[in-house]
Image (cartoon, rainbow, N blue to C red):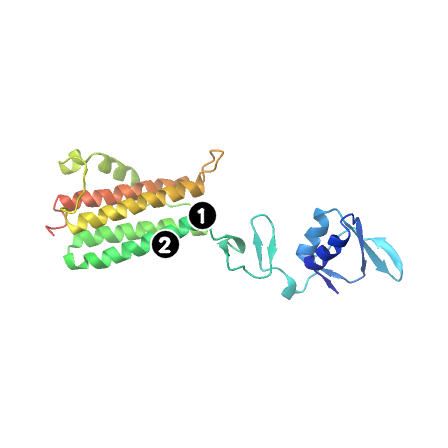
Amino acid sequence: MVLTEEKLRALYKKDENMKEISLEKGTILTPSARQFLIDRDIKIIEKTNGKREEKKEIKETVNEELKPKYKGILGELYMEKPEYMTQIYGNVLVKKDNKRIVFRGLIDSFQSHWLVLMKDLEAIKNNKLQKDLESIEKFIKNILVSEVIGEALVEIKVLEKNLDEIKEISHNPKKYFNREHLFGISSKDSYLVIKLNEMRALSREMEIKGVEAFVKENGTVERRDILLALNRLSSAIYIMMLRGVSGEYGNR
């Protein structure tokens, strides 16, 4: 006999003062049924040859077919993955509106937009532009993979600069480009600069979702490496905009 949580709940509904349950020897408990009994401090009395004896341990001797394939972040068990849930890591499930899952979706969306931009700008045929676009693409992929597999971002470069250099250059356009900051982008600017500005704005939205995912209400900060990378991503795109208006990608 297999005793499931569903069957236990039905029995418990009839007697919410249940303190013990009598089972025939050899009865198999599913893991969720086991947890149900433990949570309610219900003793198992095993019947053997007409004698009743308290079972000291509840063993998870369950057929492979009956073992849950997934678990939730609160320890709940699932035989199958509900449509409204997805894996956050391993076989652990969360709802699809989990903040980390929302963040992953936004990275995925940003990456898809960046690939479309790369295709759009192929016609310019500027080697430096294509190299910079590819550098940003690789940077985005590194962030996504790092978050999914749970490993720290290694020391990486974008636009052939380290992250400290990206910050320095983006904050000082007068020093590096002999011009002021790009305020007031308008339709009169080149298509290249306007599209890069659009992606810069989207990257800032992604950074906000990253903060929501990794900064807890109590002030605890997770994945500082990813948050730093997201901040530098918008700065790197801004540098590309400065290169664009300065003619480094040609005059188109």
Q: Residue furthest right?
A: 50
Residue 107, horizontal then vertical, whole percent: 36, 51
Residue at 45% of width from left, 37% of height from top? 221
Apparent side of residue 175 relative to residue 95 in the rendered image (left or right) = left
Mark 1 surroundings: few (<14), some (14-19) or many (≥20) residues within 10 A: many
Residue 77, horizontal then vertical, whole percent: 61, 55
Mark 2 surroundings: few (<14), some (14-19) or many (≥20) residues within 10 A: some
Residue situated in front as seen by the camera: 151 or 240: 240
Residue at 32% of width from left, 54% of height from top? 111
Identify residue type, mark 2.
Answer: Asp
Whether residue 143 is visible, yes or no, is yes
Which structural element holds mark 1? helix
Identify the residue position indicated by label 2 in the image: 108
Mark 1 or mark 2: whose residue is earlier in sequence: 1
Which structural element holds mark 2? helix
Residue situated in front as seen by the camera: 55 or 41: 41
Identify residue type, mark 1.
Answer: Arg
Q: Quadrant of residue 152?
A: top left
Answer whether labels 1 and 2 touch (C-beta < 8 Å): no
Identify the residue position indicated by label 1 in the image: 100
Looking at the image, residue 122 lies above or below residue 156: below
Residue 219, horizontal then vertical, whole percent: 46, 33
Residue at 72% of width from left, 47% of height from top? 40
Residue 247, horizontal then vertical, whole percent: 12, 46
Residue at 21% of width from left, 58% of height from top? 120
Looking at the image, residue 120 lies above or below residue 219: below
Quarter of the figure with the N terminus: bottom right
- The alpha-carbon separation of the residues under discs 1 and 2 comes to 12 Å
Residue situated in front as seen by the camera: 112 or 95: 95
The mark found on residue 48 in the picture is none
In this figure, what is the number of numbered marks? 2
Looking at the image, residue 246 lies above or below residue 122: above
